[in-house]
Amino acid sequence: MRIWFNKTFSTISAVLRNLRESASSDEITLICTQTYATAAAFLAADECYLEPSDRVGQDYLDWCVEFCDRHKIDLFWPGKEAPLISANHALFDVIGVQVMSVADVSTLTLLHNKAHFYRDLKPSVANIMDFIAVNNHQEFDAAVETLSANHEKLCIKPAVSVYGLGFRILDTQRDSITHMLKGVEYQIPLQELRQGMLNTPQFDTLLVMEHLGGVEWSVDCVGRRGELLAAVQRKKSPLAGHGQTIDNHPEINAMVNRLTEHYRLNGIFNIQFKEGAQGVRLLEINPRPSGGFGMACLSGANLAHIALQAIKGETVVESSIRYGLKVNEINTPVILPDL
């Protein structure tokens, strides 16, 4: 089976390595493309190619179909333009290529925007934090006043964001020079933020939310069209350098099952949770492998192999997960490829 991973996040290296551990080179050939020649993921692939950096939308979709046909791809595992590719499975079906999509195009589009996602989510499926979406300073001020009545701390995050970019805790006491001198991270002075908003009459949707100050979990999952096949909870230590623990929180297990079924999730995906004053709350669903995917697979569950078994229609044997296991990652120096 020839499996192609197009341009995506660097975390795909862990997926490639775990696939290689589960199958010989006679069974699968791992093909990776990126827009630059020194991509670290190339080190874990059998075949590496450069893809055009200037193609998007329909132009990129056409290129993907042509690439699959030219390189005799059996399974396409998309990163870039995943929603568009999900909406066009038929183009790949006619040339005999199976596409691994985490969800249909409407769900992938929904998950991309957290304001839309939170509004869509039913409390019977999962619990979320209190939030208000805003687009100008008047709405922001009103949201802060409303949420402050019930929550001691508030935070903000863009509705469209990855890797926590743009997340800040609202600081009502200190100014930015104090933050800089004291090395305060992920906080922003409320009054200075408000002043900046006065200079920007309208801005992209920003979520004002209750701040969840407790433990965080990252759950790496494998599904098959709404059926949860495996899930590994990584409980993060609040102390830097103290690693993570393979956990088995029953409430999180229940929410992961319901979310997988509700959104008919498929393949490899990641769901994040955090504890607040009112209990565990859902943060987001990432329709892709997480940055800690490799750590999750140390638990005894080779999630990439399970996903491949599901794709091939094979019976998936339940993994024996080592709960309580402490895991971490280390940096390893490598010589980068140069195509």
Image (cartoon, helix red, strand yellow):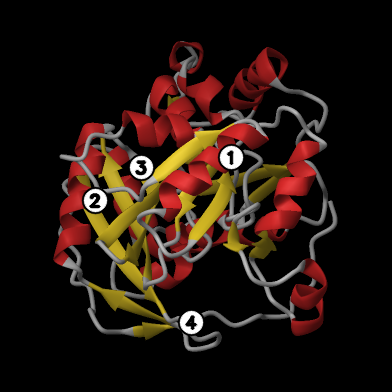
Residue occupying image coordinates x 47% and y 63%: 153
At label 1, counting other C-alpha atoms closer than 10 Å, the crowd grade (few under 14, some 14-19, many 20 or more) is: some
* Precedes in sequence: disc 1 or disc 2: 1
Judge from the rendering whether residue 194 lies leftward or rightward of residue 322; answer left or right: right
Q: Secondary structure at mark 3?
A: strand
Q: Which residue lies at the image location 45% right of the left edge and 17% below the top edge?
A: 89
The answer to whether residue 167 shows anywhere in this view is: yes
Q: CA distance from mark 2 to mark 4?
A: 23 Å
Is the C-beta separation of discs 4 and 3 under 8 Å? no
Amino acid bearing label 1: Phe
Q: Give the structural element (helix, strand or loop) at label 4.
A: loop
Q: Judge by depth and name the residue closer to the eye, 6 or 24.
A: 6
Under mark 3, the amino acid is Gly
Residues at marks 1 and 4, CA–CA distance in whole angstroms? 39 Å
Q: Which residue is mark 3?
A: 267
Say which of marks 2 and 4 sits in front: 2
- In this rendering, the answer to whether 27 lies above or below 239 is above
Between 8 and 175, the one lying in front of the other is 175
Q: Does residue 140 appear left or right of residue 308 in this picture?
A: right
Q: Looking at the picture, which amino acid does disc 2 mark? A: Val
